[in-house]
Amino acid sequence: MLQIGDKPSSFQENPVDIVDKDKIMEELADKIATEKYNQKITELERGITANQDGVSIVSKKHETFVGETFDAYVKETGSKLKVLDEGILAQVKKGDIIAALNMSAEQITIDVSKLAINADTVVKWLTAKGINADVIKISGDKVTIDKNGITAKMADFLYEDDNGQKFSVIPRKNLIVDHCFAHITKGYQNAQFFNIQYSPFWEIHGSPAVENSIVETGMEGMINAMRINGEDWIRYKHFRDVQPSKKYTISAHFRAAILSGKRVTAEPTIRVKFGTWQGDNPVDKQIFEKKFSAPKIADGKIVRYTVTFTVPQDYNMSNGYIFFDIFGYGQVAYGQSCMVSGVQLVEGELPCIYNWDLSYAQAIGGETPFSGFTLGTVDNAFLFENNRNKIPFITAAGDGHALEVKGVSHSFMSFTDQNGRFGYIGHGSPNDNRFRVSTRNNVSFDKYIEAPGINMGGGAFHGPGSMYYGEGFQGINWYINEGGWRIASI
């Protein structure tokens, strides 16, 4: 205790700590309210009633303070307990304030301005307009957490869209490599769309087309939205990163399409196929297919649909496959198509939030410039294998091997512009026995050309038009071929 002065006084506790402050305040208020009245009439009611309806216990006190005029102050307190066949009703009244407990077989109703529970409380389900737990406050549809944040252990957080579909906000690995069709090579543009020249990951069936993103559609935007229907559809061949007996969820985003300047739609469908290979032929063993409602034409909004499946227990990654087919029920001739993009495959029963990453799509599509890039591994080798319908792979092809382009029957590198391909280098047709440099333009060299011989007639060497300098039937000399070899006359 700290006091002013040089002599201590005796210690006395604060009256608030040793008396019932609320009771004192209540009695004082009651005294002030009734002091102007000179007469008090008190009515007491005590009773226990038992009849065919039940048992009722009543205790009531009614005090009326009357003044010299006609005004009066009424103070009424009481309690009531009713035991009925249907339940129990307990009621306490103090003036105009009533607290009631109504108990039935179906529920318990507590009607009181404030309920204090001083005990550990276990609630199976709680519905409330607001909860205030010091650092966490729930009010209506908002949750407020203090500045220190929240720590969750082994928990999932879900988001529900307008269609009632729930998504996890916890990121997961997307097992679809080209999930937004960024790796697809686009060809010529026809009004609203680009045709597809090459797709390294998605197998193209029919003539699906990629929407031109700079053309205004008046609908919600997507990245590399692809037009699909019953004739024009896509397939993703998956071989790894899935385990037997586990659940996975594939999802995709869909939207209405534009055909001949008009909005059209179709019913999106996702099909999952499991099977094994017999040689180079796939043999289906199980098929899951789900058709969804067509995206709305009026609002032009994106909808997301999902399919959850379980990988068969006998699935073998070494000789098995999983095909994911995405198409729309309808035909272009009847004005039926829809758009698709943003495909996701994750482990579990729920998809997770999809990130529309435009920078990734632009970088892969060549729209973002690079200051430099590297092809190769630690062994300076990169293997790209085209037209292989089984497991694609990347491996070191040998020391100093910078790039290998490999095909089944032929392979080449193309050069294209807005008018299409203008040249290629390589084996341009199946079983070609010549390595060709083909272009629509003349070829110019700014350095010396070193070659053992040439043919200037467009045919094979040793045929008419061939020429070389070297050892021949008359020693070292110039030789030409005009149907047979002879010494060139100079």
Image: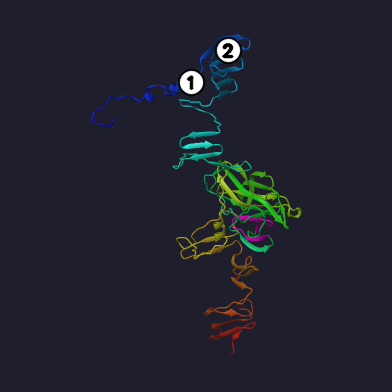
The Cα atoms of the two marked residues, 2 and 1, are separated by: 30 Å
Q: Are marks 2 and 1 in contact (CB under 8 Å)?
A: no
- The residue pinned by badge 2 equals 56
Q: Position of residue 238 (x, y in %)?
A: 58, 50
Three-letter amino acid code at disc 2?
Ser
- How many marks are shown on the rendered structure? 2
Mark 2 surroundings: few (<14), some (14-19) or many (≥20) residues within 10 A? some
- The residue pinned by badge 1 equals 30
Q: Position of residue 102 (x, y in %)?
A: 57, 20
Kindly report the secondary structure that dominates the magenta region of the rendered protein. strand
Query: Please, what secondary structure does the residue beneath circle 2 have?
Result: strand
Vertical side of 68 occupied by 361: above or below:
below
Q: Which residues are magenta?
A: 192-211
Vertical side of 2 occupied by 222: above or below:
below
Marks 2 and 1: which is nearer the front? Answer: 1
Q: Does residue 241 appear left or right of residue 233 in this picture?
A: left
Residue 206 included in the magenta stretch of the image = yes
